[in-house]
Image (cartoon, helix red, strand yellow):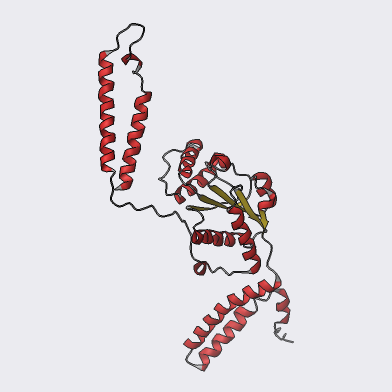
Amino acid sequence: MVNNWLERVDAIVIEAKNFQKAEGHAKAECFCGRFPDIWTRHKLSQKATGIENDILEAIDDGNFRRISYQPRLLVGITSSNVRGYKALNSRTYLMNKIVQTLMDVEVCKTGVCGMGGVGKSTLVKELAWKEVQDYSFGTMVSVKLTESHDVKSIQVKIAECLGMKKFEVDTINVRASLLRERIHKEESILIIMDNIWEKLDLIEVGVPFGDDHKGCKLFFTSRSLHVLTEEMGVDEQYCYKLDVLSKDENWDLFEKKVARFKQCLRTECNSCKTHIRLTSLGRALYGEHLYPMGGQEDEKQKPKPKQKK
């Protein structure tokens, strides 16, 4: 009901503005001793009266006893347990630095760089979840990019995250204007762009930042520090490098993952009611799963079949 009323009010405002700009007002006024066009003045008067009545009616209908606020837009945000995220010291320290930077009113862009597979996308998901829990931003948008940037597809992804209707136009500039107008309605918004490969023109996409919208914060991930600093304009002091895990963290993470595997094995063992089935399961796991996990060095330790003479 409230949304319908708001759409109605917007329509009245647009109609009133168009009426003020409409041609014909000059003919309804006296000029150099000439009498105004009576018919034109009559028509304009009728139009103005109609708009006035619409405004008064909208004011009367706008006395709502109870109003509910639209929930925050949180797209693709899931809990840590569902994502399987494991807190590690190096990642926790980096996460805290990123959060501090995002809270800095003077900084609008920040990012993380690191080699492929080091965990940038995982860090992005955890960052989004943390910001949701802390209510740091009113709206959260997370977009996964591809190696070849397509502005139109990026615009569509952002629009979907913002709950916008499907674009009825195909022109990039018009889409950018619509996106910019929609993002400006958010007092505070975090836009995450994961996997930046090359320069992306944010103005062309329709993302306001800096003086254009101080409440809009941007977070990028990339394999290249050069892309973040030179192509996306992120200050190097706000670019954080995500290194590979230390040996201790590697082992800690491995143990946590194996613990789940052990539980699966226990379940399988409990389902084996006979000695033969249990032995068969053990031999299958030993031959098909344990050796491939080792690599080339472990291949050398495998018992070699005896060659027939």
Identify the image quadrant of residue 113.
bottom right
| Place of residue 175 in the rendered image (x, y in percent of width and height, measured from the top left) | 47, 39
In the depicted view, which residue is nearer to us: 14 or 86? 14
Position of the C terminus by quadrant: bottom right
In the picture, residue 246 is in which quadrant?
bottom right
- The residue drawn where x is 51% and y is 46% is 153
Q: Position of residue 100 (x, y in %)?
A: 61, 56
Q: In this orientation, which residue lies closer to the viewer: 193 or 183? A: 183
Residue 260 horizontal side relative to residue 61, left or right: right
**Outermost residue toward the top in this view:** 33
Measured from the top left, where is residue 232 in percent x and y?
Answer: 63, 45
The answer to whether 58 appears left or right of 182 in the picture is left
Q: Residue at x 26, y 20 (%)?
A: 43
Q: Is residue 77 left or right of residue 227?
A: left
Q: Residue furthest bottom?
A: 275
- Residue under the image location 57 percent in, 49 percent down: 218
The answer, for residue 194, to whether it is visible in the render is no
Vertical side of 136 occupied by 276: above or below: below
Report the front residue among 221 and 126. Answer: 126
On the question of residue 133 being in view, the answer is yes
Does residue 133 sit above or below 29 in this rendering? below
- The spot of residue 306 in percent (x, y) is 71, 86
Give the number of callouts. Answer: 0
Quarter where residue 166 is shown: top left
Q: Residue at x 52, y 41 (%)?
A: 206
